[in-house]
Image: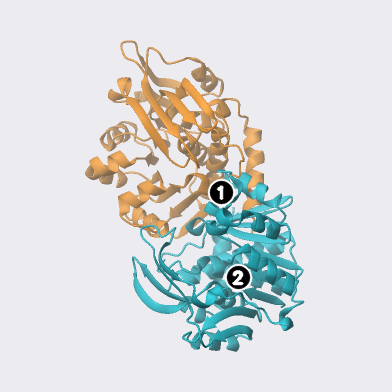
Chain colours: A cyan, B orange
Amino acid sequence: MSLVVVGSAGIDTVETPSGRVHDVVGGSAVYFALAASLFGPVKVAANIGADYPEAVWEVLRRRGADLGGVRRYADHASFRWSGRYRGDMNAAETLRTDLNVLALPPEPPASYGGARFVFLANMGPEVQLRCLERLGGEVVFADTMNLWIESARPALLALLRRVQGLVLNDAEARQLTGEDNLIRAGAALLLLGPQVVVLKKGEHGAFLFARGFHFALPAYPTTRVVDPTGAGDSFAGGLLGSLAAAGSLDPPGLRRAMAYGIVTASFTVEEFSTRGLERLERAQVDQRLEELREFVRL
Amino acid sequence: MSLVVVGSAGIDTVETPSGRVHDVVGGSAVYFALAASLFGPVKVAANIGADYPEAVWEVLRRRGADLGGVRRYADHASFRWSGRYRGDMNAAETLRTDLNVLALPPEPPASYGGARFVFLANMGPEVQLRCLERLGGEVVFADTMNLWIESARPALLALLRRVQGLVLNDAEARQLTGEDNLIRAGAALLLLGPQVVVLKKGEHGAFLFARGFHFALPAYPTTRVVDPTGAGDSFAGGLLGSLAAAGSLDPPGLRRAMAYGIVTASFTVEEFSTRGLERLERAQVDQRLEELREFVRL
């Protein structure tokens, strides 16, 4: 499997109805890589500060990840995010963000160039474009967020003309297209460039839109949602991990990849931080995939 | 098919981003019956005032409905509801309600007694209990709403011990059980009495919970949501119509009935009032069922 992720590695403080964790491991590249590494070796690019804990990299090394692109800056602190979830936990409330080392642009090593699958996690679209130019990649998926849709729309639209896939949530899809109806929003996003648009809806599952083909899955029916942090990046990791392992974007592969994304994310939300993913074995993922198949069998 | 619905027939004024309609046909029993009558003859019980238009009953008569339980009160006005939907249209904002003839309890005729399938549309749970006692019924499904959960909980709980099925929306399920997680809410509702709980989620589709079996479907991916009024009752009409026509509650029948509910509701929301349902032919419903099957095929 030939898959690179460029994104963040951060230290999170999170409060949910289930409790509170202080200074735990997080970040888009970390969640993505832990998820994708269940499907094959992944190459990780992220900036970390002097204070970033080592243990999670050990887990990734054991799963065959290439960590040559994880750059530790001894004179910087790690990116920190503090947030809270309430009620149905469908949206995070950010309490505090300290960019720290995230202010430095990620520089994926030259050795990552030529990977066939690339995931550009949520970053400014100019930064994503520079990574794309540096890495190439035949199948490039990008994530984004409300901040860039609002403040950097021209660069984001330029990025969308260059990528094969876009992963975003329902609110972002509505904001980016101006369409309230999610099916229309999906169709509108396909016109902006990507061949595949994946729309994440949290507890309501996900939609996939491609040319001449669309597909929906509900979330895996877990009764234990402890911490939704990283669910979206874990979903993307399962999705891209599955696609990169299969090496194709045909409809059956896209359906299976969506299901792997959904199932992988379900393990993430059942524990705080990356705990659910760190312990996870591929066999557990495959078992839930069969349960999900049964859950939606019409 | 042996199916009775007891509910409301009203006159609605509705505003949505697509426009506004004034004094159009509505009401739970009307939407339900128009949907269910695509699957076989349905017996309708509802109170109407002197001012209720005749045309919709003609449609139902042509579809074999028994309207012996539609009682016209010459000295009353019909129930009137006025509401507005905005943005993603997931929730109605009620602008005005005039109960009028809805203040009189519905009295399903004695000839409706002994029907095997019964749907008690949203009404006060004491009224639903009286209808249940009058009608009997082997498979009784009930709907409810936030008002009764808040103001008549003991009667609602007594009703739930007597019915085989409950149909309600996600917010109501959370309110009734105190569970934010919908899968836990579904499990909690099964403990209150019903063998089958169907949880409607609007644009996000529906869940079905039964003992030892659960099932999820997304909404049919329509790009044209004009007016969501009556979607829930149309869903229930498709669901119960399909179940009553098949005569059983086995898992394949429940899956198929959910799909018919979803698909029937998709035609309702594509037009104002009951227009989408009045014109509908069974073949169109079956075609969308196949499209839905393809949309969720994993």
Relative to B60, is A263 above or below? below
User: Image quarter for residue A43?
Assistant: bottom right
Instruction: Name the one closer to the observer, A46 or A64.
Output: A46
Q: Residue B196 — which label?
A: none
Per the model, the C-alpha gap separating discs 2 and 1 is 24 Å
What crowding class fits label 1: few (fewer than 14 Cα within 10 Å), some (14-19), or many (20 or more)? some
For the point 67% across and 79% down, the residue is A108
Nearer the observer, B259 or B66: B259
* Number of numbered discs overlaid on the protein picture: 2
Residue A238 disc label:
2
Counting residues from the start of the chain, the first of labels 2 and 1 encountered is 1
Asked whether the residues under marks 2 and 1 belong to the same chain, the reply is yes
Depth check: give the residue in front, B27 or A75. A75
Q: How far across and how far down the image is residue A144, in percent?
A: 59, 61
Q: Which amino acid does the dot numbered 2 rest on? A: Gly
Left or right: A272, with B205 as reference point:
left
Query: Amino acid type of disc 1?
Result: Arg
Residue B192 at least partly seen: no
Query: What kind of element bears circle 2?
Result: helix
Whether B172 is drawn above or below A254: the answer is above
Q: Quadrant of residue A253?
A: bottom right
> Looking at the figure, which quarter contains the N terminus of chain A?
bottom right
Q: Which residue is mark 1?
A: A174
Percent position of residue B123, x then y: 32, 34
Instruction: Specify whether A141 is left or right of B196.
Output: right
- Chain letter behind tag 2: A
Q: Residue at x 58, y 55 (%)?
A: A149
Looking at the image, can residue B187 be seen?
Answer: yes
Q: Chain of mark 1?
A: A
Per the image, label 1 sits on a secondary structure element best described as helix
